Image (tube, grey):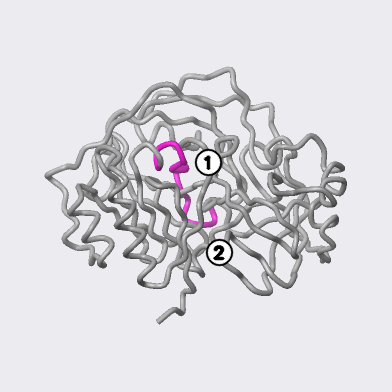
Amino acid sequence: MIRGARAIGLVVCGWITLSPTLSNARVKLDALGHYLTNQGYGGAQLVDSGKFYHLPFRSNGKAGHLVVDTGSPASLIFRSSVKRLGLSETLSNAYVRGAFGSSNERYGVAIIGSFEAGNCLVKNVPVAIASDMGGINAYGRPNGLLGLRELSKFGAVLDLAHGMIYLRPSRPGYEVATAIRTMLESSGWKPVQLTEARHHLRVPGEANDVHCHFFVDTGAYLTVLDRGFARAAKIPIRPTRATAHGVGRTGGNVGVGTFRSLWIGNYQIQNPSVSIVSMDSRMLGRDTDANVAGRLGRSTNAEVVGLLGVEYLARNSAIFDFVSGTLYLRPSHHP
């Protein structure tokens, strides 16, 4: 499944507290986890469905689980789960838009009055509502997506290396981020600075020796390059019978491309194999795919050409620090 959900902006703010009635005693914490809990964070164990990372939670006391999706600008609940999670939907005027363009469906909006996960209690969390995405129910039947806005608002630390997420009542000072960097760099992780563009996380990199940017998307299982960029960068494309699915609409046929080197900041992945699809040019921030070839000869430093998916993030022990906006990577076989 390939996804880069764009959810509508919501103006209602949520807040988070730690619940004294819940405990993380059953979760074995590493050094990072112990440090974060001593700094006022609450932790929750993630569930790996084999494709995505799910966060078990309770919405107004009703059990569910969300895919942790850094590619979704805001948190989103699938329409089929609205009633079972005790929510009330109000229809908005915004149309659903994802990695492959917009649809005729309008977003709904709702408020989760009580959101419990692990030993965290979050109050009054605004969410968007849209139809279920094709094919996602094959991977754990999630009720929706935990998106970038909430991850950033609560200064989350997302640790895919150990399957944990940490949230805090309020964003900490940068001394916490400094301590995280010192701890992770001393253990072999390399930092890559994240920036935000069009409500998505972006990292600089290279694909087949072409400078570019990628959106970082834990809600996309496979790493994806736009078909127009792949052709211009002379990446061979092998056709498949697969079809890409996203919020709002499908993305057509999927190709596969293998090339010599993929760089994420100063972190190298050798001989990567990626999916090739026709992505929405508006989401990537350009008018038409035809402009790609013209820009390759000049500068592609601002060009977003695809999604860095969870398969390479997981293989390289990704840890996200949403306080400082840093992605840390290290080979999973690192001693």
Q: Find residue 8 and name its label.
A: none
Q: Quadrant of residue 261?
A: bottom right
Q: Is residue 139 left or right of residue 303?
A: left
State which quarter of the image contains the C terminus: bottom left
Would you place residue 255 above or below residue 321 in this image?
A: below
The mark total stands at 2
| Residue drawn at 28 percent across, 46 percent down | 117
Residue hosting label 2:
311
Residue hosting label 1:
72
Would you place residue 120 above or below residue 45 in this image?
A: above
Q: Is residue 183 left or right of residue 302?
A: left
Q: Is residue 281 left or right of residue 204?
A: right
Which is more toward the observer, 194 or 89? 194
Q: Residue furthest bottom?
A: 335
- The span shown in magenta is 136-151
Q: Residues within 10 Å of mark 1 (few under 14, many from 20)?
A: many
